[in-house]
Amino acid sequence: MESKGAQGIERRSAGHLPSVWDGEVIESLTTPYSFQSHGGRFEELKRAAKELLATTKEHCDQLNLINTIQRLGVANHFEQDIKDNLTKLVDANIYGDLYTVALLFRLLRQNGFFISTDVFKKFMERDGKFLDSLGEDVSGLLSLYEASYLGMPDEHVLDEALSFSTKNLLVQMKKMEGHMAEQIQRSLEFPLHWRMPWTESRDFIHIYQRDDKMNPVLLELAKLNYNVTQSVYLTELQQLVEWWKHLNYKEKLPFARDRLLENYFWAMGCGPDVQFSKFRRNLSKLAYMATILDDIYDTYGSLDELEKFTEAVNRWDLKAIEQLPEYMEVTYTDLYSHVSEMARDALIDNGMDIVPYIKKQWFYYTSGYLQEARWLHNGYNPTAEEYLENARVSIGISISIVYGVFGVVGHSVNEYLSEFVEHWSESDLLCVPAYIIRLLDDLNTAKIEMERGESMNFIHFYMMEKGASEEEARDHVKGLIRNLWKKMNKAILKDSERAPEVVKVALDMTRTTHRIYQYGDWFGIQSNENQDCVNSILHPIPIEQHDQA
């Protein structure tokens, strides 16, 4: 689409490949599972699992059961039962081994309870080092390793726990083969606390069904829960495919990444509970539009065009398209239509006009992009810190969590408006995920971007500022991400009782982004590993006759 008044402008392109997904194929997919057809059996299994939670009395057995339920992805059905059980354990005297104490610590903190690092003192020398005798306790080391990722700032015991457990697990792993070695390797690469629940549940189901201690009720419940939930996601995606086909950006905006399925997968991970269908739809559309805008601001648009588009977003008036080139008219009109749809729903569902808040968020977001375009146009190299302060806005996470506030808290939204919407830039729960996700993005896209001659990346600016090698810059970013997670853990603990819905959105969003960037540029390269992620919402898990309890 050649833009009016755009003749003579030299257009850049990142050379993105077309989508590997075929809308017609997606629309043709079916599944035999649904809440309607399998609801009876599903409720039976839930009752049996609830009884299991109620009748398991030994502390260690309770902890193992809760851990299994969470990793199988069915904990949302037993939130109160799990909370009641853990409440009894907060002040309990757990005299167990390292495995049990570390598991207790992790589960309490993961579920919003504070527990002091003092519980680990009995496993440590007076000099603050862990006992050498623990170095061959593989299950204890792995449990300690996973617990260390629940640390907060200045909790040096957990820093030592991470160092000690990592060093010894690497030694023990060389002596092992099979399932346990694989589990250790996976944890060392990607700790439990950072994992996306949806993909973790699918992976753990395959591990759990080979476990000698496997409970058939929990296994069947996990598989059925996964499959009926997947059926909801598939239906939602098929509805979005109609919207996608209507936009026809493959023809209208061929320079931009056309990534609906990747965008929906990310949105699904950010709001996985089945009742939040509208939130997933809205966040999918936000992510899709944001991917298009990323390519417009990064490569395709001239600075003058970008200035006009950003001002049009600020005006939030369809008449503003009169000043825009044709390709931007298309984008602006579709963005306006998306926000209008979301606003109508909010007015009907919650009696609230959210347009003033949402349009302000879109202006903040596009202004962040514009700042980067100005730097590039003027040949200005910001410091790494200066870049990061702007890039945590242009990554789009703050606006996404604001979407979450409006999408999941319902009629109680007024309680959160001041802190999480109007003063979002002062909230750690919104800002820390934005920093983490920006750094994750830059860490996994820097190499290919720098090869293309693109410099708007934290790693590039850090290398320039510090005279560091790329490897040193990457190590620095990984350290920043770990320390930011400590701040995130502190924010989660502070707000989990007062604003649990917002905490869950922020945490799910951060974990999902960790997952999608695990194998490189999620929105760019469409690798086999990334396609496997998307396939997890297209196809159910097979349930054999012998799986049934």
Image (cartoon, helix red, strand yellow):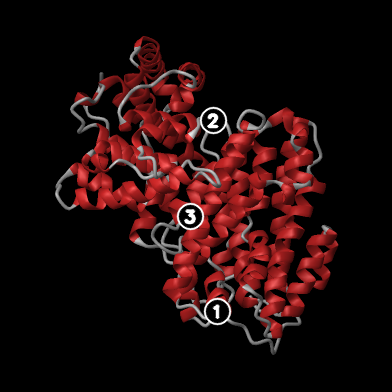
Where on the picture, by quarter, is residue 219? top left
How far apart, in angstroms, are the residues tagged by discs 2 and 1?
A: 44 Å
How far apart, in angstroms, are the residues tagged by discs 3 and 1?
A: 23 Å
Residue 259 visible to an observer of this rendering: no
Q: Which mark is residue 218?
A: none
Residue placed most toward the observer, 314 or 90: 90
Residue placed most toward the observer, 277 or 374: 374
Q: Which residue is mark 2?
A: 114
Where on the picture, by quarter, is residue 434? bottom right
Residue pictured at 68% horizontal, 65% vertical: 390
Q: Which residue is mark 1?
A: 454
Quadrant placement of the N terminus = bottom right
Q: Amino acid at mark 2?
A: Phe
Q: Which residue is mark 3?
A: 262
Lower position in the chain sequence, tag 2 or tag 1: 2
Residue pictured at 70% horizontal, 80% vertical: 302
Left or right? Give the position of 393 relative to 509: right
Q: Secondary structure at mark 3?
A: helix
Numbered-mark total: 3
Q: Secondary structure at mark 2?
A: loop
Tell which tag, 2 or 3, sits nearer the viewer. Answer: 2
* x and y, in percent, of residue 417 in the image: 77, 39
Q: Amino acid at mark 1?
A: Glu
Residue placed most toward the observer, 425 or 531: 425
* x and y, in percent, of residue 423 in the image: 77, 47
Lower position in the chain sequence, tag 2 or tag 3: 2
